[in-house]
Image (cartoon, rainbow, N blue to C red):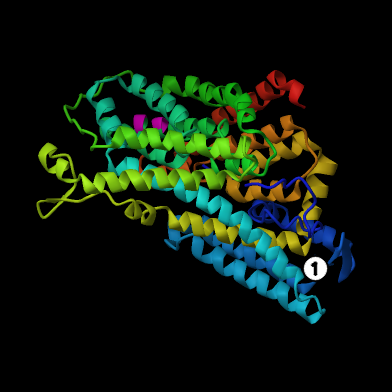
Amino acid sequence: MGRVYNDRRAPDRVAATRSPSPERTIALDKILTALLAVFALCLPGLAWATTGDQERLDLTRHWVGYAALGIFAVAYVLVMAEEFTHLRKSKPVILAAGVIWAMIAVVYVNNGMTHEAEAAVRHNLLEYAELMLFLLVAMTYINSMEERRVFDALRSWLIRKGFSFRQLFWLTGTLAFFISPVADNLTTALLMCAVVLAVGGDNTRFVSVACINIVVAANAGGAFSPFGDITTLMVWQKGMVEFWGFFALFVPSVVNFVIPAAIMHFAIPDQRPTASDERVPMKRGARRIIGLFLLTIATAVGFHNFLHLPPVIGMLTGLSYLQFFGYFLKKTSRIDEYVGNGNSRMGEVVPFDVFNKVARAEWDTLLFFYGVVLCVGGLGFIGYLGLASELMYVQWGDTAANVAVGVLSAIVDNIPVMFAVLTMQPEMSTGQWLLVTLTAGVGGSLLSIGSAAGVALMGQARGKYTFFGHLKWTPVIALGYAASIAVHLWINADLF
C-alpha cells in the first residue's frame, strides 16, 4: 500500500542531492552503477556545490562515493538472496544505511561542515516516519480483519461454491484486482492463493497458472489506487498526483490484467474440483472493523485534500477509531462466550487487543523500508542521483525513462525504484507521473521476484508456483505491460 506531504515540489534545502526520498535511488544505482562510475570519472574529485544558502560536497569521485555504492550493492544482493540465505531483508540495508551515512559524516566533519549531513538525515527520517506510520495503521487494520476471520470467511465461501477451475481462475484474479486497491497486494495475493491451493490440490498446472494470474491482478489493481501499493502511496503523499487522479489508471490497469489472463485461460484445465462444506463464521465486530477501515481511508483523504495536512495524520486518527472499538469489544468480550465465536485459550475467550495487531505488523518490511530510504538518501546526497537523473530523464526522455523504471522494478523492487524517481523529482506532466506509477506498480509482475506478492506466493505454493514457471509466461505478461502503457498514452493523452 504502499506516501507524504508538505509541498515537496519546491527545491530541497540540500537541492543537489534532493535528499528527501532515499529509497528511490537504490534500484537505479544498482543497475546503473557502471554508468554512474564512468560519469563520475569526468567530475572533479571533491568539489563544492552551492545550493541556495547551503553547500554540499560532490563525493561521486571520492572513495566514500565508491565505497557507498559497493556497500549498497552488497546489501541489496543479500536482500535479493533472502529466499536462499533466510537472512531477513531488513538487516543488511539497516547496516548499510548506518555505514554509508557515517562515512559521509566523517568527510563533512573533516571539511568543517558539521550540520549539512545531519540536516539531510533528519529530512530522510521525516519522510520515512510519515510513510512508516501510514503503513503501520493500514497493517494494523488488515491484521484486525484477519483476526476477526474476514479473509477466512471469504476463502471458505469461495471453496464452498464449487466453481470450476476456469471460473476460479477468473474469480480469484478479479477479486485480487479489486481487493488490492483497498488492502495491500501482498495480503490480497496470499488470500487468493489460499483459495487456489485449497481447491487445486495436486493439480500443479492449475495452481501455477492461477498464482501467476493472482500476482498480475494484485499488482495491476494496486496501481490505480493511492492505497494499493507503497509506490502509489509515495507518489500521492509527495503531491505529484491528486487522490482522484490515480483512477485515470483504472482502464490501463484492467488491460494489464485482462490480456495475460485471457491468454492464460486456455492453459487452465476445464475441470470442476470437489466442493467443500467448510464454513468459517466471522467474529463479532468484523463488519464494523471493515467499515472503520473505510472511514479511516476517508479521514486520511479528507485531511490531505481539504485540510492540507499530511495523510498520515488522518490515518493515525483512524487508528483511534479502531482503538476505541477494540476497547468496546474487550469490555463486552463475555458476549463471545455465548456465541462461541471467539478465540479461546484454555477454554477462555481471548479479548480483542489492538496492540497485538500493531505488534503483528510486518516489521521486517517496515525496517527494510527505513534502510532503503536512508541508503538511497545517502547515495543521493553524495551526488549519484543527479547523474542518474541526467542520464534517464534528459538523455532518454520521460516516456522511455518511465517505461525502463517498470522493467527495473521487475529485477529489483519497485519501492527503491520509485524512491529514486521521486528523489530526482524530474519536471514531468501529470500524465508522466501516472505513467511511472503504472509501470513501477505492474512492472514487478514480469518476474516472480519482482514484487512482494510473487515472492510470498513462491513460499506459500512452494514447488507449484516457481520462478521458472512464472518466467515461461513472462512474454504474455510483457504483452499486457506494453498494452497498458499504450492505452494510458492514448486515453490520458490530455494529461501529458
Dot 1 surroundings within 10 Å: few (below 14), some, or many (20 or more)? many
- In this view, the residue in front, 426 or 266, is 426
Q: For the C terminus, give its image quadrant.
A: top right
Q: Disc 1 on helix, strand or loop?
A: loop
Give coordinates of residue 454: x percent, y percent. 46, 42
- In this view, the residue in front, 119 or 253, is 119
How would you classify the magenta stretch by its main secondary structure? helix
Report the residue at 55% width, 47% height from top.
312
> Quadrant location of residue 102?
bottom right
Give coordinates of residue 396: x percent, y percent. 81, 40
Report the residue at 62% width, 58% height from top.
126
On screen, residue 341 above or below 272? below
13 on left or right of 238: right
17 on left or right of 99: right
Residue 76, can we see it?
no
> Quadrant location of residue 268?
top left
**Callout 1 amino acid:** Leu
Report the residue at 26% width, 26% height from top.
157
316 on left or right of 423: left
Q: Is residue 324 magenta?
A: no
297 on left or right of 17: left
Give coordinates of residue 253: x percent, y percent. 57, 26
Give coordinates of residue 493: x percent, y percent. 74, 21
Counting every numbered tag in the picture gives: 1
In the image, which residues are magenta? 206-210
On screen, residue 81 above or below 55? above
For mark 1, what is the residue?
59
On screen, residue 340 above or below 45? above
The residue at the far bottom in this view is 110
- In this view, the residue in front, 339 or 202, is 339
Report the residue at 59% width, 58% height from top.
372
